[in-house]
Image: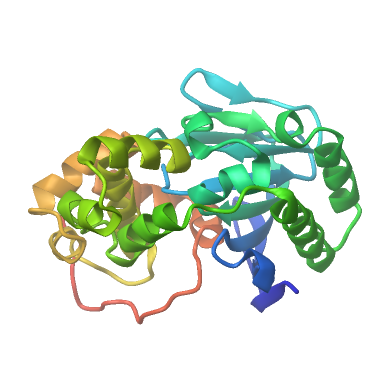
Amino acid sequence: MVRVLGETRRGSDSAGSWEAQLAAPSATLVGMVEGYGAYHEQSRAPVVRRELPEPRLVLVLSLASGLSLSRGCRSLSPDGPSAALVGVGQQPIVARHHGSQTVLEVRLSPLSAECLFGVPAGQLADQVVDLAELWGKGAIELVERAVVATVAERFDLVDDALAAHAEEGRPVDPVMQGVWNQLVDGQGAVTMGALREQTGWSERRLACMFREQSGLPPKVMSRLVRFQHAVALLRRPGHRSLASVALTCGYYDQAHLSREFRELADETPTEFMAGLRADTAGAEMATDVVVAPPDTNVQDGT
């Protein structure tokens, strides 16, 4: 059964209002589904946001007016409620809506792709795919039922749909699961030698197998895991120096962190932080449960 986490978070400012609710998956899906998030936003003007690349799949159910998602030259711009699966990639996703959105997001391990959607993550890499292409009529029915459901019911509907596919899907390869766990547990600070030793495979075989099942080669996935760690630290309330974030996340120095931001986010860390301050709703809705107290009395770097 889905477990709702905490109370619904709400906020408002001169730009509009928002609310967010998080939930954990049922026991059946632990290890494949990382979590659920339900979001509603009313804005006084159209909104355009860049969602940074992540080392995970994201299933997005848009339950109100059309939400447009694009990555590079690939885009989905439905007129009404819809569902899309965003593959792992190294480019930001651009999300647009006309001033109102009601969304349910599911964060998934990339290794779950074949089990839950019938295709390995390698075929979804850098893609934004209409869920109906993978689930057919079932995707359309899920969206239609979710539109008229409560938030709690939406969590259960999506969880039940994923669990049903998991029962029929191909199980996750335990060797790949071990590699993935090592990357995540090490927050990207894992050598390829350690991964080869764990699998007993050659570097070439490891790279090919992992890319097929996760969407990216292990070196690139490790890079994204480390980048996600840095982004999570910068999102937390309080002040952290960029130098301390770089050190914590295993970058050589602050300049190394800044280069990674330019390449993966198309902006500097300072520009990213300025964007968070300018977009209160986006920053607050993207904030997960804080697991450590914020650092204080430390100035932002440049």
Q: Decide if residue 205 is on the left or right side of residue 42.
A: left
What's the residue at 46%, 58% (across, down)? 174
- Residue 188 lies, in percent from the top left, at 26, 56
| Picture quadrant where residue 8 is located | bottom right
Nearest to the observer: residue 51 or residue 179 = 179
Picture layout, residue 273 above or below residue 127: below
In the rendered structure, the answer to whether residue 12 lies left or right of residue 265 reads right
Residue 166 as seen in the image, left or right of residue 174: right
Instruction: Residue 237: name its quadrant.
Output: bottom left
> Is residue 44 something one can see in this rendering?
no
What's the image's color scheme?
A: rainbow
298 shown above or below 17 = below
Residue at horizontal 64 percent and vertical 61 percent from the top: 36
Residue 170 is at least partly visible in this image:
yes
Pick whichever, 258 or 136, lies toward us. 136
Q: Is residue 3 left or right of residue 269?
A: right
Picture coordinates of residue 294 (x, y %)? Answer: 33, 77
Determine whether 176 is above or below 292 in the image: above
| Point 73% across, 43% down: residue | 62
Up/down of 20 relative to 55, above or below:
below
Quadrant of the image occupied by residue 67 = top right
Q: Which quarter of the rendered picture does the N terminus lie within?
A: bottom right
Which one is in front, 7 or 109?
109
Q: Tell me where residue 299 appears, x and y as whole percent.
A: 18, 67
The percent position of residue 7, horizontal first and vertical second, equals 67, 78
